[in-house]
Amino acid sequence: VLREAQRCVANHVSCSSLNAFVRLADSSAILSQAQNAASTTGPLAGKLIAIKDNICTFDLPTTASSRILKSYKSPYDATVVKQLREAAAIIVGKTNMDEFGMGSHSTHSHFGAVKQKRVNGEESSAGGSSGGSAVAVASDQCWAALGTDTGGSVRLPAAYTGTVGFKPSYGLLSRWGVIDYANSLDTVGILARNVQDAQIVFDTLNKYDPQDPTSLLPSTRSRLRSSKPRSRPLRIGIPVEYNITSLHPHIRSTWLSTLHYLQETHGAILQPISLPSTRHALSAYYILAPAEASSNLAKYDGVRYGTRAPSPDGTPESVLFAKTRGQNFGKEVKRRILLGAFSLSAKAMDNYFIQAQKIRRLVQKDFDAVFKRSNPLLEESFSAVSSDSPNVDVIICPTAPTPPPTLESLSNQDPLDAYMNDVFTVPASLAGLPALSVPIEREAKGVGMQVLGQFGDDSTVLDVSEMLE
Ligand code: GLN
């Protein structure tokens, strides 16, 4: 344990140019915890785990990579952090991210962009928003890391960095102490070097938390466990709508070879499926997520949390709020607040927010129509699987449409192009489904395949992902 800890701590120094961490724990504290953990048993004892900086820790600041929270220190640990500490894991530090989780390349950070170095020396995107967590794992600065995934923020960085990124079903892992971006979509996710390690972290955190009102109740959890087992042989759905023209040829060929591998080696049955609402999922996500964000971020006004713009006594509140928010939010966050406030306004509500909610339902229905397992969240009468269902156990598709772009090519990228990166990750988020990005051709870095399962069928997603390692 101690040798492993020493190795990671040494890597912190050699990897500092990657900017994966906003704050590292003191190395002497890490080593002394490792010494103590050596006498503790359990699969996480002495394991070094990094935490995305939007998850609260009482001993290290929690900034969400925003200037508005740059000196904020939470008085408590998030439940997921508490669970890790109870399992004798060592928290190595807080990882860099897109401000408040808004972004796909971890470049929108008050602390500067997260970087990945290519073999030819070029710097490429680490993916976002949990890019710091992904790079920390990929560069061996920790054993595993926690991230958050609202629309793909754990899966996209995993694909870009050659790591495993797992977003469990919505409501399985506690969100208490996690800074909200869009509550109805936010999930804590796990980045690890392989599926087995991700499973160990997942098993430790997968518990009901009475402090999180969206945590799935013990009764629902036991219903999930008693659902139908997967088919033998495995049935894999291939969504035809995902074969978009902008799919990079190398990603398309890797997708095909992955499917053939499962067919030949594991006898899997490949089943083309249709998810017709998928093509509207991205637009719906970019209405719903900013709408929730604009409401969640209203509390950063310089009065209750974080940085306050200097103002003389007697400054009217509205001026103080505007100055504080104007000076301390980054430009992507401001863009989302404006977008959200607009789509929730009386004039735009019906045409944007309500339509997007309807699309979200259709996306969920599309998924329910193809899976063999019924959706455990629906009433019996709505959840019966129809007789013409393709009855698939999982869906497999690429995590991202292209390999990671260079940081240079992103410097003047249109925000809409960045949003396009999330086209394959957003549907599972809208439906709350478990999804895991597994690296293919690990050495080449940058191609991840995504395994999606029915709500609550996280164990099948993990099993199938393991077949791909
Ligand atoms: N890239 C998406 C966004 O900017 C997803 C982010 C996330 O999952 N936190 O909203």
Image (tube, rainbow, N blue to C red):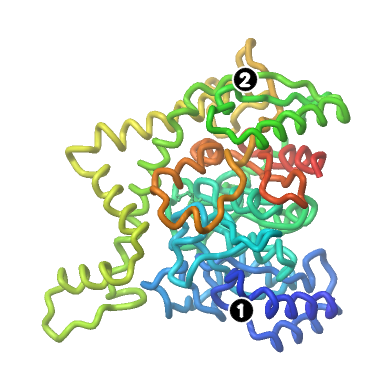
Give neighbour class at mark 2: few <14, some 14-19, many 20+ (Cα, 10 Å). Answer: many
x, y percentage for residue 407? 53, 58
Secondary structure of the residue carrying numbered label 1: strand
Checking the image for residue 24, the label placed there is 1
In this rendering, is residue 18 above or below 293? below
Percent from the top left, x then y, of residue 367?
57, 27
The number of callouts visible is 2
Residue at figure coordinates x 27%, y 52% from the top left: 338
Say what secondary structure mark 2 lies in: strand
Extreme-right residue of the structure: 265
Q: Quadrant of the C terminus?
A: top right
Task: Please name the amino acid that badge 1 sits on.
Answer: Leu
Mark 2 lies on residue: 273
444 or 85, nearer to the observer:
444
Seen as rendered, the residue at the extreme top is: 388
Q: Is mark 2 within 8 Å of ligand 1?
A: no
Alpha carbon separation for disc pair 1 and 2? 46 Å
- Three-letter code, disc 2: Ile
Q: Position of residue 20 (x, y in %)?
A: 60, 69
In this orientation, does residue 239 appear? yes
User: Which residue sits at x=77%, y=56%?
Assistant: 197
